[in-house]
Image (spheres, rainbow, N blue to C red):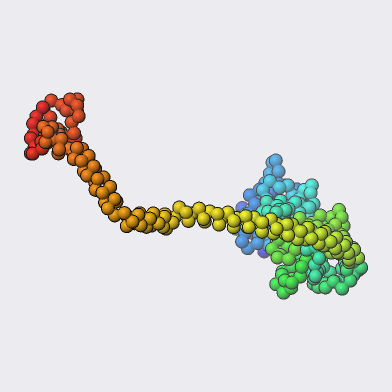
């Protein structure tokens, strides 16, 4: 590619700008324009609105920057694009830093960007707001999923810098409040490149290799938004969300709020406050245990009184039950006697006794007994003959029945015209029709 220089002779000028005698090729003209533009606009800062933003799988991004009257193609390569904290999107007004260049295959000029900042709102603040909105929509901040911090943890894990003031404050306070508490420190970088990855790995390693830890304190001391940024990274937020161990976030000062604070099970305004929250003071615990012991002794005394009262009631109840059982036994004996009186065996026994008495009387006066019985049989036989329908029919009477139903006809209304009748006489039967 020829370099652009000011023409010093007529021939040189003709070659560089083209003429009828010495025309330029398209490539030569494009190279001249490219050289001129890149030298003149090698470091520009522009403001415009993002349009037609497209992120390529390679990590490069392509879009346009526009205002009310013009539009400029823009490209940002992966290396520079990966440094942007916020997410670019259409309609966003940005301040762009880069250089103007020409893309020869199309003959288009464009701006190659090295840095982009949101117009009006800092890049980190915008990235913070964007990530906060995204994770909140996914439910990572939901109160329903937050777990209670164990009241009396046996083992506490720390994910923080091993040389910062935060870890010294935490250890001093924990030693003062509950000396002898088992503490596991996982030292990590808490700011700068790679800090978010180290904090994430610390949380994940605790879950993988120290699952017996009851609670984790994750954080660092105060600083600028740039210093605290590791705790605003998405990978840290998701590590906290996925942790099976409850987490207390302790980042910066009381006025500092990070994404980690919103995801954690409990936010402590400072690392020192986290140490205060993670476990109660041993003296306070002992005092509280003493109070519980005294209350238990009082309850025990009350329970002993109640037990004595229960024993008295049991004795009274036993006495009542014994009396009730005796009465029930007498009642059962009485009912048993009455039941025996009405039982078949008792009745048969009574009949047997009466039969025996009759037999004794019969044997004592057989003739008188036979005469009475003979007379009674004859009397009954006479009555039987008088009541016998056959005897009545021999005197000229008959029985009239409806032939079909065999129902006895007692009155005229019992039959209908044309109905067949069966007439029974003392000797034989006759059928007739009404």
- The image quadrant of residue 174 is bottom right
**Measured from the top left, where is residue 396 in percent x and y?**
11, 32
Viewer-nearest residue: 6 or 228: 228
Q: Which residue is drawn at 72% across and 74% down?
A: 209
**Measured from the top left, where is residue 387 in percent x and y?**
20, 38
Viewer-nearest residue: 333 or 95: 333
Whether residue 319 is visible here, answered yes or no, is yes
**Depicted 82 relative to depicted 137: above or below:** below
Lateral position of residue 360 relative to residue 192, left or right = left
**Measured from the top left, where is residue 23 in percent x and y?**
61, 56
Q: Residue at x 32, y 57 (%)?
A: 363
* Quadrant containing the C terminus in the rendered view: top left
Viewer-nearest residue: 74 or 54: 54
**Measured from the top left, where is residue 369 in percent x and y?**
29, 51
Q: Residue at x 81, y 59 (%)?
A: 305
Lateral position of residue 391 relative to residue 61, left or right = left
Viewer-nearest residue: 417 or 126: 417
**Depicted 384 relative to depicted 275: above or below:** above
* Quadrant containing the N terminus in the rendered view: bottom right
Whether residue 277 is visible here, answered yes or no, is no
């Amino acid at each position: 590619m020829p370099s652009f220089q000011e023409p010093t002779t007529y021939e040189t000028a003709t070659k560089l700008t083209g003429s009828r005698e010495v025309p330029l090729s398209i490539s030569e003209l494009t190279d001249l324009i490219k050289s001129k533009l890149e030298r003149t606009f090698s470091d520009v800062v522009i403001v415009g609105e993002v349009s037609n933003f497209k992120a390529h799988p390679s990590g490069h991004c392509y879009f346009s920057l526009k205002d009310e009257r013009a539009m400029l193609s823009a490209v940002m390569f992966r290396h520079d694009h990966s440094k942007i904290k916020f997410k670019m999107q259409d309609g966003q007004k940005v301040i762009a830093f880069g250089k103007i260049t020409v893309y020869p295959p199309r003959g288009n000029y464009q701006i190659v960007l090295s840095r982009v900042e949101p117009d009006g709102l800092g890049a980190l603040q915008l990235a913070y707001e964007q990530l906060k909105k995204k994770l909140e929509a996914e439910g990572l901040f939901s109160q329903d999923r937050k777990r209670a911090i164990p009241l009396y943890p046996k083992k506490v894990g720390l994910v923080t810098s091993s040389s910062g003031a935060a870890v010294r404050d935490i250890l001093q306070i924990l030693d003062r409040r509950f000396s002898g508490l088992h503490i596991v420190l996982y030292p990590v970088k808490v700011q700068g490149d790679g800090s978010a990855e180290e904090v994430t790995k610390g949380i994940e390693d605790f879950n993988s290799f120290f699952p017996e830890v009851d609670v984790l304190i994750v954080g660092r001391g105060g600083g600028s938004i740039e210093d605290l940024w590791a705790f605003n990274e998405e990978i840290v937020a998701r590590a906290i969300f996925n942790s099976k161990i409850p987490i207390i976030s302790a980042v910066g000062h009381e006025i500092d709020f990070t994404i980690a604070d919103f995801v954690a099970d409990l936010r402590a305004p400072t690392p020192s406050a986290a140490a205060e929250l993670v476990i109660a003071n041993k003296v306070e615990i002992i005092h509280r245990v003493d109070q519980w012991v005294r209350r238990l002794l009082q309850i025990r005394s009350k329970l002993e009184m109640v037990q004595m009262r229960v024993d008295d009631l049991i004795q009274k109840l036993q006495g009542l039950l014994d009396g009730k059982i005796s009465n029930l036994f007498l009642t059962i004996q009485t009912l048993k006697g009455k039941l025996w009186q009405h039982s078949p065996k008792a009745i048969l026994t009574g009949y047997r006794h009466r039969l025996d008495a009759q037999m004794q009387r019969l044997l004592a006066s057989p003739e008188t007994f036979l005469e009475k019985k003979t007379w009674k049989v004859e009397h009954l036989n006479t009555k039987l003959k008088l009541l016998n329908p056959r005897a009545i029919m021999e005197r000229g009477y008959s029985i009239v029945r409806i032939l079909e139903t065999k129902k006895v006809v007692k009155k005229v209304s019992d039959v209908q015209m044309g109905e067949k009748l069966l007439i029974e006489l003392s000797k034989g039967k006759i059928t007739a029709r009404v």
